[in-house]
Image: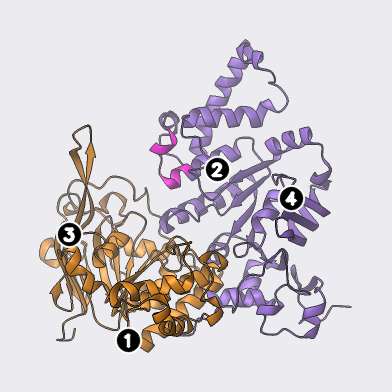
Chain colours: A purple, B orange
Amino acid sequence: MLLDIRNLHLEFQTFDGTSKILVGVNLQLQRGDILALVGETGCGKSMTALSIPRLISMPPGKITQGQVLFEGEDLLQKPRSEMRKFRAKHLGMIFQDPTTNLNPLFTIREQLVDAVLYQCHAADKVSGRWKNFLPSARQLRQDAHARAVELMQLVGIPDGKRRLEDYPHQFSGGMRQRVLIAMALAGSPDLLIADEPTTALDVTIQAQILRLMADLVKRLGLSVLLITHNLGVVAKTCEKAAVMYAGRVVEQAPVRELFLNPKHPYTQGLLQAVPTKHTNRGELAGIPGSLPDLANPPSGCRFHPRCPHATEICRQQVPPTITVGPEHSTSCHLYPEAT
Amino acid sequence: MSATTPLLEVRNLKMHFASRQGLLRREVSQVKAIDDVSFSLEAGKTLGLVGESGSGKTTIGKCVVRLLEPTEGEILFEGNNIAHLSRKEMQSKRAEVQMIYQSPAASLNSRMTIGQIVSEPLWIHEGLRTHEARHRVLELLHTVGLKEEHYHRYPHEFSGGQQQRVGIARALALKPKLLVLDEPTSALDVSVQAQVLNLLQALQDQFQLTYLFISHDLGVVRYVCDQVALLYLGKLVEVADVEAVFENPKHPYTQALISAIPEPDPGDEREQILLKGETAAAKPERGCAFAPRCPAAKLDQCARVEPLLVEVEGGHQVACHLFSETERR
């Protein structure tokens, strides 16, 4: 088990009171897998992902309970200085908008070499400004440059050596995302967290980037946590998926099982809300209502006001997470707890 | 095709933007956002305008509602050319052609209440004060699934889906015949998107509306549209009925685009056609705009001659040398 998030609770202090953003998130990711984290706006999928590298500012955020185990080690207990080294060595992250994550004033070479230096060496070797002038630092820079060229090739940027000298605006959206993937991979991380990596891209470019990610997983033995709201992307790229609703993982299963045999009413609704080639006019089913206000969430199961099967118990008790099949778990009162 | 005049007919539409530089704002180059686009749309139907970013689909929408004056070409609305009408002349037509925008939050004035927003077109076109229009506004809110209590609220109090409903109510206020929907659901979550799409279909049946549906989401287009027109760098590459496009795509670009839609079905084993390069790459000077990325481009015409949009089967038009018998010889 590479990553095991157990019973994670996250709160935010807002003017309207305390918002309970995550209420008991459980998530498991095996080494070499691509796990999709699916959900709609505000369901907490990005917050779950940001809790892993501890990138949530506290305050206003506060983790009240839970563990984030990375190879058995609880990241939430690590001191800050160690956490920096840990991020550099083991984690890579890419985000939705590749443009805002690149500095427009520096060439790709400067940014990529920086990333390589920091992730491969800086965390333990180069510290203090004066060391930049030592001959060994020069050697480091040269090595880093060679590594940068290698990374550009790895992510499929043609003519990478020359393009290192270009500025971000000279790249198209898809190419910028490739550059960011290269940066994330600089330190050969174990886990790549991809937060909506293709949402800002056109479909043909999206297909290229997804193909690249799947390829990298195979070649580098990477594990990926892919955050997305696009169920098509999940079906195409991932082996396992976790569906989140209002701060909880409501269902987790292998992708094929999840699509063919969804258990939780929210998952079922979500799957029916996407028009496919078999959907006839007027047959598209949405989920009535909208996401709850997390400062003042519904009692019991947070989905009950929108759920077609809601009963009295749903209003009162939070459903436990139960296993309904091989590697398939859900939290819903509809399914009896296995004894 | 029936003999009746279509509600909307666009003929040889061109929209070129000048790129200016220097103190004298001299024209240094032209961006051909739309280049010779023709299509027609019959009353009561939905035409999907599909393309990737930069293909010119929104520009066409803006020309149709005349937020832009096209450089050349005709836009026939009920047989009358509205392409070059003056602001004044256009005003009376505006009631019949309305637009719904992509970002519901940005298209509503945050300082006005819902009642004021929805009644504003009634004030402009019929001179009705907000309180005089109240009854009609409430009726409109009801039609789009909002409640009476929403009348005095402000846009920020609503969710994205509800804001889009307000935008729809405002567009319907003047009983238009044609609605230009510019990516109406791309800012919404899937569960809410389904609600809005269903609402749009119900309204179409109720008021016999005609939709020009601009979208990049082919799944949604397949669900909503009767006909599809595909754009690539400002040119139409394929126009056909929705089934024909999805079941039997002709143009290599259409084929690649359709194969690139990730279907929410893990059993889907279609082979994906991966396109090389990206759309943003400069358009070639001559020949087919898609030729540099085209997996099928091998005819030497592709690099030299621009393919014309020709009909290959009943109502199925394609602009590709692979299909133009006359030019292949």
Question: The disc numbered 4 marks a residue on which chain?
Answer: A
Residue behind mark 2: A181
Q: x%, y% of residue A330? A: 74, 72
Give the residue drawn at x 37%, y 61%.
B256
Magenta residues? A167-176
Callout 1: helix, strand or loop? loop
Give the residue drawn at x 60%, y 49%.
A217
Q: x%, y% of residue B155? A: 51, 66
Mark in the foreground, 2 or 1 = 1
Callout 2: helix, strand or loop? helix
Q: Which mark is residue B307?
A: 3
Q: x%, y% of residue A7? A: 81, 59
Q: CA distance from mark 4 to mark 3?
A: 58 Å
Q: Main secondary structure of the magenta part?
A: helix
Question: The disc numbered 2 marks a residue on which chain?
Answer: A
Residue A173 inside the magenta-drawn segment: yes
| Residue B235 position by quadrant | bottom left
Check contact, mark 2 vs mark 1: CB within 8 A: no
Residue behind mark 1: B208
Check contact, mark 4 vs mark 2: CB within 8 A: no
The image shows residue A167, relative to residue A310, as above or below, that is above
Check contact, mark 4 vs mark 3: CB within 8 A: no
| Residue kind at label 2, given as amino acid type | Ile
| Residue kind at label 4, given as amino acid type | Gly
Residue behind mark 4: A61
| Residue A269 position by quadrant | bottom right
